[in-house]
Every structure is written in structure tokens, then in C-alpha cells.
Amino acid sequence: MTVAPSGPAFCVREIPFSHRGSWLSVSPVIAENSYAEDLHLVSHRNGMHPVLRFTAPADAEVTARPALLSWHDRAGRVELAYAGPDTLRLRGRGAGLRISAAATTLTPFSGTYLYDDPVDSAFVFTSYETGRRYRVTVLTGAAEAVGAQALGTAARGVVLPADRPWEVAIEEYATARRPYAADADFDDLVAAAHADFTAFVEAVAPWRGPETPAAELAGYVLWSATVAPAGFVTRPATLMSKHWMNKVWSWDHCFNALALAPGHAELARHQFHLPFDHQDPAGALPDSVTHSEVLHNFVKPPVHGWAWRQLRRRSGRAVPRAELVEVYERLTRWTTFWLDHRRAPGRPLPHYQHGNDSGWDNATTFDGDRVIEAPDLAALLVTQLDCLAELATELDRSAAATRWADVAGEVREALLNELWTGERFTVRSARTGQARSSTSLLDLMPIVLGETLPADVAATLARRIEAHLTEHGLATEPLDSPHHVADGYWRGPIWAPATVLVEDGLRRAGHTALADEISRRFRLLCERSGFAENFDAKTGAGLRDRAYTWTASGYLLLAGDDRRRRG
């Protein structure tokens, strides 16, 4: 009965079991930092909602690989695989399973209702939270319903026996669909999922080998976190996670696009464009997009010019003129937002309104005053202006190219004249004009300007960046800072996007030895500690969400670049 396992093994408490295109996952993680004893079927529609609980024998061991999840003990085994994005298949031999509603209480506005469907004799759970139905169809063996049609607080579930073989399908759907008919054998489903995953990884990491032991698992994190278009998600999208960080934030998506670009250029293009599909009339990108909401309370930094240049280089594809025009117009509106709506009268430099606008939410740069002209913002905007000048030239819009280049020069000059002291970059209050400095790595991010920085400025930034380098990578706040907090979000931990941006800027500025070392340490960190949202800079332990796609993408980018440099 058992299919030979293949692909990287992973701990389902850290990385959820899912399938490309699915809005479902199987995991014990049922809310932010909340772990259940049992695995749950979790839906990521309308938020993150545990819908069904899978209760296996208490001593059963769980193993997970990309195409197959199983519970097994001495008596028998239960196996679970995806039969497509919205359908799971489960089978058992010598082991029973209880599939029950995760919520024990049903109210007129919440919870999950269970009934026997007289049309096809299936058992159907219907969830208020997700607005979907979950149909359990018995394919072989027998099952018993508990709590069908019960209201209020009650146990509701489907019990599958241990004393006879059984197999069921679980489908997520809206209101109705034809009775389920199995058109593939369980083993064939496992083989198909494995083939899909293997082809995906081969495309994004054909260079992988013994020197890059985490590449396949990084590929699985991306593959399994990708969902089909639904709700406000207008394109196939790689969520940041299929844990609680199940959104697309408007700078995180860039790093996933870059990692996908070499082997999945069209999927990478969708990642880049998705937030632009929700650009507001002022030109601003949303803070985040997910199935059922688009948030505009904050923005994210203008990293997109840098990302577009990288995307073209990494994908290696010819970009049709129509797409160039679309990118140019979208980047124009996004850039104009910063120039027209985020510059105080008479000021050449744009400002953030809150740390969240920078993506470095609580960095020490924002201590004391959060409405600030920040050096990272100016540097990223200069890069985006330069990108627009290049695109305008390519599109034969010479006047626009000259205008963008002129504005880029003005912002670059103001960055160096007003925020550079000769030893460090400062930030300036957009309200009072008062300048101050911090010890955050964020203040060193103008290194993204790379070869366009004056050599002495780049050298000073490189020296200061090196002071942030711990055994495991770049601490966002130095270990000896009085403000360093081990699990302090942007006040100490190591993050993938900062690592990728700094490594790239240093390399382009000619500081290749330091760039190499930063890359090496971050890659080793991921190989030891997985793909957490961020990492303790002192111990290297993974922190927060433990299956974060931009971390996996950061590993793939740095590892792939390293392998290519080595030929």
C-alpha cells in the first residue's frame, strides 16, 4: 500500500503540507503562534481558518514529504495526498481517523455545520468562516457520522475505522458540485504531485547539489505556498506563508519574483505585477493583498525599480513592448506618488509616515520620530528613477528619460548633501527638519546604489555593514547595541530581504569579499535553521513564521548566484 517516499522530508509543525495552487494546507498551526495537538485542514480564504481536525491514534508518528503526508504506528498507517488544488485523498490500513469540525460551537454567524447529503450520501461540513463546504466522500470502506445536523455546542465529525481498509476524498467548494468520482488511483496522485514538484524545483534550481542541501526544501516552500487566482488575488500568487502570514505584501513579492524568474518567468511576472493590480488613484501600492482584503493603511518602499532590473536580468527573456509600456506606466504612477505626495513643500527628499512604510516596521531608525526622510527611501527612489529613465529611453520617450534622470540626480544629490555626514547617513524629521542617527542596518541601505555611490561613501558603508555581521548573518541591530532584542523583529534579527539587498549593493560597489561572506553565512543559516521569517542574530534560531517564502527565495537567489560564479 505505502508509496515509497521521495523529496525532502520536513517537520509539519514548521512547514505546512500543501500543493501548488491550493488555498488549503494541513498543519497543526491554527493561528498566529498557536499550535494544536492534532493536524488540521486549514483554509486561507477570508483569513486563516482551521476547518477540520484530523485525530489519529495518539502515538502515531507524522512524516511529511512534498507529495505525501502520513500518520503511522505499529498497527497501521493513514496517508494523505492532494488530488488537485481543492481536493484531498486519505486512505487507511490498520489505523482509524476521526475528521471533525475544528470549531465545537455553531452559532448563527460562526462555526461549522455537518449534515448527510441525501444526493450522494456524502458527509458535508459547511463553514461560516471560509464561506465554503467540505465534502467527505467515502470511496472504499465505511464511515460513521457523529453530530450530523447538531446545533449549538456539539461534537461533529466523521469516524473512519481501524479494523478495515478505507479511503475518502475531501473537497472544498462553494455551493454545489457533482458527486465525487475518483478518476485516479491514490498512488498515481502521489506520483503526479511529486512530478509537479520535481519539475518546479528543476526549473528554479537546476544548479542544486550537495553544496546546496536546502535548495529542494526552499523550492517546496515556494511551490506549496503558491495559490490560484481567487478573490482579490488576481493572478497565481506565492503567499508569504501558508501559516498566518498568508498575504502578499508590496515588497515581499519582489524577492519571490526574482527567485522564480530563471525557471518560471511567467509566474515571476505575475508576482511582480500583482500589487500593481490594486494601485490606487494616487499611484500608491497597497500595503498587502490577500484573498478577501486589500489594505492601504500603509505602503511599502519603492524597491520595484531595483527589482525590475533584476527580474529582467534573471529571467533572460525578451520583454514584449506592450509589457514594457505597462511596467513603465505602473512604475511611473508609483514613483509619482512618492514625488507628489510624500515630499514636504520645498523638500527634495521623500518621507515615510511610519516604520511600516519602510517594511522595517519597528527599526530603531523610527525611534522618537516616525515621519522621517530616510536614506534607504531616497536610495531606493533614485534606483527606481534611474530604472524609469532606462525604460523611457527604450520606449523612445527621450524627453521623459531626461526628466527622470534629472529628478534622480536631484534626489541623489540631496541624499549625499543633506543626510551624509562623512561618516554615516542620518535621518531627518519631515516635520521639524531635525537630523539624528541610529544604529539600525536600515541607515546603511543606500549601499543598494552600488557602483553609482562615491567610492569613499561605499567604503564607509561597507565598514559599517561589516560591524552588523554576526556568525549567522547581518543583524538588523548590532549585538552590542543597547537596543538589540533577540526576538525584536527589526531590532536585531537577521532578515532575508536586507541580506539580499545589501549583498547585491556591496557586490556592485566592488566589495565582493564582504558580499561573498554575507552570502555564505546566510546560506549556512538557512541550511541549519530552515526558512523562518527571521532569525536570532546571536544563536541562529528561526523566529516567528517558520515557513516564509521570501526567506526561501533569498536562499535560492544567493545559492544560485554562488553556484553560477563558481561555474
Image (cartoon, grey):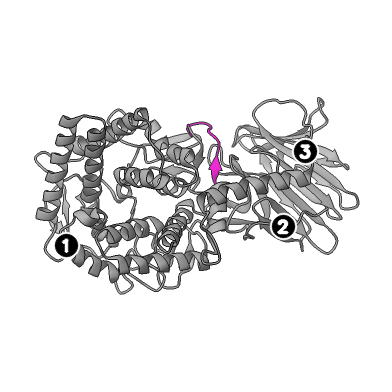
| Magenta segment main secondary structure | loop
Graded by Cα atoms within 10 Å as few (under 14), some (14 to 19) or many (20 or more), the crowding at tag 2 reads some
Res 188 seen here: yes
Q: Earlier in the sequence, mark 1 or mark 2?
A: 2
What residue is disc 1 on? 455
157 horizontally vs 527: left or right: right
197 horizontally vs 463: left or right: right
Q: Amino acid at mark 3?
A: Ala
Graded by Cα atoms within 10 Å as few (under 14), some (14 to 19) or many (20 or more), the crowding at tag 1 reads few
Res 102 seen here: no
In magenta, the rendered stretch is: 224-234
**Dot 2 lies on which element?**
loop
Corner quadrant of residue 51: top right
In this view, the mark in front (1 or 3): 1
547 horizontally vs 449: left or right: right
The alpha-carbon separation of the residues under discs 3 and 2 comes to 19 Å
The one of 187 and 286 positioned closer to us in this rendering: 187
Corner quadrant of residue 446: bottom left
What residue is disc 3 on? 184
Residue at 31 percent of width and 59 percent of height? 502
| Residue 540, placed above or below residue 355 | below
Q: Position of residue 53 (x, y in %)?
A: 70, 48
